[in-house]
Image (cartoon, rainbow, N blue to C red):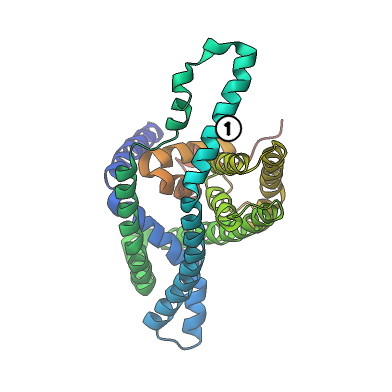
Amino acid sequence: MKSFQNTAYFLVILVFGALVLKEGAFILVPLIWGVFFAFALYPLTDWFERKRFPRGLAIFTSILLVSIIGFGIFYVLLNQMVGLIREVPEIGENVKGKLNRYYDELSLILGEGFLDPDHKTDLWSYFRSENLNETLFSTGKSLTLIGIIPLYTFLLLYYKDFFAEFLIRFSSKNKEAVIHWVSDSSKVIQSYLIGIIRVTGIVAILAGLFFYLIGVKFFILFAAFIAIMNLIPYVGVFISSLFAILYVFLTTDTLFYPILTFAVLWGIQLFENNIITPLVVGSKVKVNALAVIFAILIGGWLWGVSGMVLFIPLIGVLKITLERNEDLKPFGYLLSDDVPVS
């Protein structure tokens, strides 16, 4: 009976927690990003503190160094994006030309009436955005939230001892269990974040080298896009590859390069999933694929793209938390990748 009550309480808390996460996304998303960046920067800030830097200066220096690198990358990508936007009219004319040519070729096969000739360019109008203002507003809102993340990161690192003491005082009867939970959770988050940064860099280099060799003008932009979207498991690589293949198709006169792009990007994805990620990231999260897919979908529903990225390590932390409770261990096992051997 007690076990049933605990399970019922857990499910109620889960549903209520989902509502809080959904409604509080504006506050919680930058906070969670701040927590993750705080874990990722902790080794660097700790190194500066051991070099006798004051804590505030150590944290500020760490954030500044990472920000300089980030802004440098952003500047290069922005230049490439501006160049791509300038070529949009030319690409658009190329699209209309290709669509009209394919229409004429299909007309010979299917007959003249399969599409009204007066509306051939409707296919091109399909690609035009009708919600540009809304998109720009959403982007501005996202940039505002991004600006809060460094502040959260600084304060979380600066008051880390304060939060640790709070957890110890809050659970004085289970001090050892809390300390182990915090230690295991921090290892999961740190390993995941550092691992995906390395994987992102490797994927960007591989994709960028390929795009450069086939003569893609904005190879850095597309390589970064492929690598960043790769952070969203299963879904991200499909979307980014689709855009890259479409660009190659629109800027070349042969089908060979789009097909080659598809084959190479698919090969990079297989190489990343089966070799790079197991070696670089390892199995620190230890969550089965079904749970990962659910985490992506739920994260996307609650927090959009940020949720699709953040919920992967968060579900790893949830698994650790469930495994610490005897009554909720079965739910922790449900998330694990320990498949029983029959």
Locate residue 151, reporting x and y percent: 33, 68
Q: Closest to the observer: 115 or 141?
A: 115
The residue under the point 46% across, 65% down is: 39
Residue 286 pos. (x, y %): 59, 47
Q: Looking at the image, which is closer to me, 322 or 210?
A: 210
* Quarter location, residue 339: top right
The residue under the point 32% across, 35% down is: 12
| Residue 142 shows up from this direction | yes
Residue 192 position, x and y percent, is 55, 56
Residue type at the position of mark 1: Lys
Query: Compared with residue 45, is residue 99 higher up or lower down, i.e. above or below?
Result: above
In this rendered view, identify the residue nearer to me: 271 or 152. Answer: 271
**The N terminus lies in which quarter of the figure?**
top left
Residue at point 69%, 36% (across, down): 255
Decide if residue 291 is in sight here.
no
Is residue 23 or residue 165 the one in the foreground? 23
Q: Which residue is labeled 1 in the image?
A: 98
Q: Quadrant of the C terminus?
A: top right
